């Protein structure tokens, strides 16, 4: 199903609930991932969770220091670092870099942080054009669709849906074999990667002690977008900063367990910045985005910043499985996404704290052990006190 411009969360939910086929598919896919996650996390017990929560809490206590340490270390290997207080500042930097480039073809794997800062629009304002080069991002772009999940972007589509959608875009007879579709997508995205001048990538972690960027990349699209073009821009939210390499190893494992239930990340690459050699990127920019994160860190919602964006809470949420991530209308989706969106942009996402039964499935699934229902309940209480509950006073979803 293609979503029109969704006027409100409540209408989007109605729209999603009426589409039984998409509901069935989303539920089926997310239930499979949730089973895998439960098995994977059962192998680790609570020790990993406790360790991760400690790392995240300590990191936020020293954010300012770690941000400066990262920037100094990254500058030493030729990285141009930027600090963007707002999404608009980050978008302006991307616009400027695009404007300065003669070849304005940009490649990007889809990432929530790029969505958050409206990177695609920034590239367009700079006169450029983005091609998404990961499979999920490419299909979403061709179908002008929103992702169904923060990690499993295409959870709402069957292979047949994808075959039909791409056949229409490519003006070909529909074919539904996975191998054919994968080959065709790969050929097109590789072509875009080879002719692009700018690679725009959402980074996974920024390692303060050495100034490296880490990309967790099962497909390889992030790594290619961050190494093949002449100019590379890596964008990270402040929560992506981690103190040491030891922390990276634990956080990566927790992320991947939460996302897929697997113990080993298929591809994790550390990027030092522009390297020596003829083919190395000429410019390597890293943009660290605040956009309300420091304010969140100083608030009662600080625990939401421990999030690794693995999507496990969304996968486990019985309501999310019914409606999918498209209804959230933004980059922050699922239970913890509701906290982020409502805290950062309360007027735009005023309904989201109420999109939960507070059953606790999200907190039980989270590899960091974030008390998501507690944060949602607190938002409701705060909003009631601030008189923002008018809309839901007559009952929720
Ligand atoms: S809150 Fe926990 S489960 Fe949800 S995305 Fe963040 S780390 Fe993953």
Image (cartoon, grey):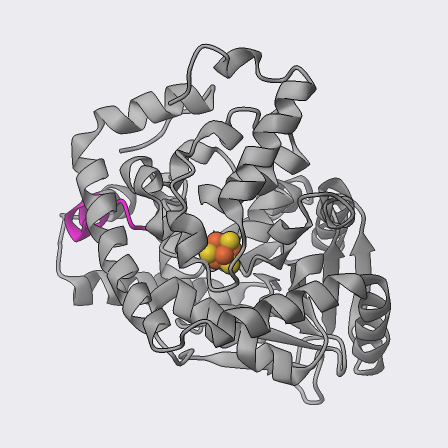
Relative to 101, is 115 on the left or the right?
left
Residue at image location 60% in from the left, 44% down from the top: 116
378 to the left or right of 256 = right
Q: Residue at x 18, y 53 (%)?
A: 159
In this rendering, the answer to whether 7 lies above or below 66 is above
Q: Return the x and y of residue 146 as percentages of the image width and height.
A: 41, 40
Can you give x and y, in whole percent of width and height, for residue 236 in the image? Answer: 66, 60
What residue is shown at x 47% (from left), y 20% (from top)? 8
Q: Where the N terminus falls, by quadrant?
A: top left
Outermost bottom residue:
277
The answer to whether residue 187 is left or right of residue 349 is left
User: Residue 73 versus residue 336: which sits nearer the camera?
Assistant: 336
Number of numbered markers: 0
Instruction: Report if residue 179 is visible in the image.
Output: yes
The residue depicted at 73 percent of the width and 68 percent of the height is 58
Residue 167 visible (yes or no): no
**Which quadrant, please, contains the C terminus?**
top left
**Residue 80 in magenta stretch:** no
| 327 is higher (above) or lower (below) than 260 | above
Q: Against 125, is 361 above or below? A: below
**Which of 391/132 is in front?**
391
Residue 277 in the image, given as x and y percentages of width and height:
68, 89
Image quadrant of residue 327?
A: top left
Q: Which residues are magenta?
A: 154-164
Q: Position of residue 281 (x, y in %)?
A: 67, 76
The image quadrant that residue 136 belongs to is bottom left
In the displayed structure, 316 sits above or below 2; it is below
């Amino acid at each position: 199903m293609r979503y029109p411009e969704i006027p409100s969360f409540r209408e989007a939910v109605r729209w999603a609930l009426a589409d039984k086929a998409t509901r069935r598919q989303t539920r089926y896919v997310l239930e499979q991932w949730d089973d895998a996650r439960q098995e994977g996390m059962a192998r680790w017990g609570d020790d990993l969770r406790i360790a991760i929560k400690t790392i995240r809490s300590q990191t936020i206590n020293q954010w300012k220091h770690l941000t400066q340490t990262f920037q100094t270390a990254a500058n030493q290997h030729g990285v141009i670092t930027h600090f963007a207080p707002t999404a608009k500042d980050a978008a302006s930097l991307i616009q400027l870099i695009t404007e300065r480039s003669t070849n304005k073809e940009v490649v990007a794997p889809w990432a929530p942080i790029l969505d958050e800062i409206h990177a695609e629009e920034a590239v367009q304002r700079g006169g450029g054009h983005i091609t998404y080069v990961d499979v999920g991002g490419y299909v979403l772009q061709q179908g002008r669709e929103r992702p169904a999940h923060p990690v499993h972007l295409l959870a709402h589509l069957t292979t047949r849906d994808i075959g039909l959608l791409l056949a229409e875009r490519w003006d070909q007879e529909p074919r539904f074999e996975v191998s054919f579709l994968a080959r065709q997508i790969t050929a097109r995205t590789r072509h875009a990667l080879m002719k692009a001048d700018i690679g725009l990538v959402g980074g996974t972690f920024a390692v303060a002690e050495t100034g490296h960027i880490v990309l967790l990349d099962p497909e390889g699209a992030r790594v290619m977008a961050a190494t093949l073009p002449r100019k590379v821009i890596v964008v990270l939210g402040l929560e992506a900063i981690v103190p040491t390499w030891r922390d990276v190893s634990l956080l990566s494992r927790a992320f991947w367990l939460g996302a897929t239930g697997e113990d080993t990340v298929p591809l994790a690459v550390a990027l030092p910045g522009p390297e020596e050699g003829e083919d190395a990127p000429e410019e390597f920019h890293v943009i660290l985005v605040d956009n309300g994160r420091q304010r969140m860190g100083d608030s009662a919602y600080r625990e939401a910043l421990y999030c690794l964006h693995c999507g496990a809470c969304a996968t486990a949420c019985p309501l999310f499985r019914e409606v999918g991530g498209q209804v959230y209308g933004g980059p922050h989706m699922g239970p913890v996404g509701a906290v982020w969106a409502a805290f950062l942009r309360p007027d735009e996402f005023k309904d989201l704290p109420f999109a939960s039964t507070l059953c606790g499935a999200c907190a039980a699934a989270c590899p960091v052990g974030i008390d998501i229902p507690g944060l949602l309940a607190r938002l409701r209480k705060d909003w009631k006190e601030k008189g923002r509950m008018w809309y839901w006073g007559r009952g929720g979803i």
